[in-house]
Image (cartoon, coloured by chain):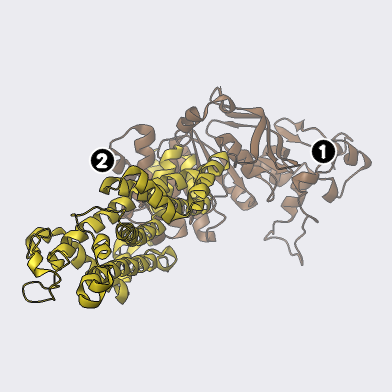
Amino acid sequence: MSTLLQVKNLKTHFFSKNKVLPVVDGVDFEVKKGETLAIVGESGSGKSITSLSIMGLVPKPGGKTVDGEIIFDGTDLLQLSENEMFKVRGNEIAMIFQEPMTSLNPVLTIGEQITEVLIYHKKMSKKEARQKAVELLKIVGFARAEEILDDYPHRLSGGMRQRVMIAMAMSCDPKLLIADEPTTALDVTVQAQILELMKELSEKFDSSIILITHDLGVVAELADRVIVMYGGQVVEETGIVELFDNPLHPYSKGLLGSVPKLDEEKERLSSIGGNVPSPDNFPKGCRFVTRCEHAMEKCLTEQPELKEIYPGRKSRCFLHDEGGNE
Amino acid sequence: MGKSEAQLQNNQNPKLNDVQSLGEKRSLLSIIVAKFLQNKLAVFGLIMLAIIVGSALLAPWIAPHDPDFQNLRNRLAAPSAEFLLGTDHLGRDIFSRLLFGGRVSLFVGFVAMVGAVTIGTTVGALAGYFGGLVDAFLMRLVDIIISFPNIFLLITLVAVLEPSLDKLIMVFAFLSWTGTARLVRGEFLTLKKREFVLAARTIGMSNMKIIFGQILPSAMGPVIVAATLAVGGFILAESALSFLGLGVQPPTSTWGNMLTYSQSVTIFRTAWWYPTFPGVMILLTVLSFNFVGDGLRDALDPRVIEK
């Protein structure tokens, strides 16, 4: 499989009057063609900003991608001008969001919103775009697609809106779909449908997906590989089966430990004590040191490197150096 | 791929087909109209406006007399069958002059409103959307214009430019877009942070398309209300200037300059109808615009629509 997207040493910082917040601090990963990569982490770990950096839509004022390369299909997106990025967004890389309730424009009909993308990127006529929109809505599971076209978003349920968002995202056959917690705001039953839909569409359109989530159930459902982020850095990169069978980094272990399992009787779920450190006072050494039960002297002063521990599996922890990976 | 398509068809959730279950199908417009009609004062204002605007438009056919025809033997005649609302100090029919004056007053109000709202909306949208330096510059400009006492600036400008209808309208539009600009900027400041704007950017929409195609439609409600209220304001301003003799020049009649000539105590005491009727027309028109504006404000309030 060839590589579609390669992110190298991505650093997106936020600048305020007297502080620099390294929200994304040296992130490396790659996405292969047709693969689904999950980015997992707690709130504040930098996963959403990583995805916005790829789109070139880091919140302004304040945010700026200061270093790194984002090589998409052979071109470095960070070198492109704003006008060139307009052609990439929506056309080559599309994105769907957590809140389907607010990510559709309340005063425009569904049809107007879908056809706009097609008219803009594919230079279709209004009529062609409308036909294509009907087709897309049928693909995402609306039987009466023509009627939906003239409806306003407030008449659709959350799951239906998310389907519309997916139809919009897929309208230009993007090579990469970034889904930022696509199911968080939905009912559990609808979640399963949406995940199923995304899986089928990515196969059908042969597009890669970056799935951003903190829901490990969603990861297990959809992803091929996983990167775990903590404090703006990648702490573990691994295949999906390996993550669940044998997580390498103490943080990944903690994350998995906090997921309830059906075949286990437990009074309390284990949790990771404390919070994600805020970017303005990251620990000097390992970012996870304040919450790690294996923390050592060394962890306080030195930052571990992201190292390949097994083929295709990387982790950022000193424990692996000791040779003792439990 | 044929297989997955078949799967998709099977996967369809019956709930999705049942759009009607989410409530009776009503367009946004019909909801707004229904809500507007519930407001009695607004409906009254709308009817009054329809009559006033209609009679102004049809003035040449309705007016019983030539509005500029003087008959000095009939000076200050009381209302009668021939002169419905009496005559003025030059023996001209007040009813006819009111009809033709309404054309000018309403024309000034509408055109100045369109100008002011266009400038104000554009400036406010750019300032609110781009923020930063653009915002600072444009809003300081607004502050500067607002800090001048309006009536004196109007008088000065009109005096320098020589009073005429088109200059009057330009001066009004140029001095009055500031309120709309602040309003629209405020709307944009909150709307641009909404997720649908980010979503629009992720599909590669340009800034201008987002400003005018995505955000502006959401911000139009308050703008329409402000525009309606502004028309009343411009009619008042025109009347005030005409009253001071700096507005529309005779013999063209406007409601304002009709009041100018009724200032003298003799007329006040002997011919009550001369100052009364233009005054009543201004009052009714401005009041109606305000009622309609209030009604629109309620009808367009999205919080009530979403309910």
Chain letter of mark 2 equals A
- Earlier along the polypeptide chain: callout 2 or callout 1? 2
Kind of residue sitting beneath label 2: Lys
Q: Mark 1 points at which residue?
A: A317
Which residue sits at x=88%, y=40%? A299
Instruction: Pick the residue in front: A208 or A62.
Output: A62
- Expressed as whole percent of the image width and height from the top left, the position of residue B132 reads 58, 41
Kind of residue sitting beneath label 1: Cys
- Chain rendered yellow: B
- Expressed as whole percent of the image width and height from the top left, the position of residue A231 reads 74, 43
The picture's colour for chain A is brown
- Expressed as whole percent of the image width and height from the top left, the position of residue A35 reads 56, 35
Q: Is residue B80 above or below residue B26?
A: below
Q: Quadrant of the N terminus of chain B?
A: top left
Chain letter of mark 1 equals A
Callout 2 and callout 1 share a chain: yes
Instruction: Pick the residue in front: A305 or B180.
Output: B180
Instruction: Pick the residue in front: A147 or B121.
Output: B121
Q: In which quarter of the image is the C terminus of chain B?
A: bottom left
Left or right for B240, reference A302: left
Q: Is residue A164 above or below residue B28?
A: above
- Callout 2 crowding tier (Cα within 10 Å): few <14, some 14–19, many ≥20: few
- Expressed as whole percent of the image width and height from the top left, the position of residue A67 reads 68, 29
- Disc 1 on helix, strand or loop? loop
Q: Name the residue under label 2.
A: A127
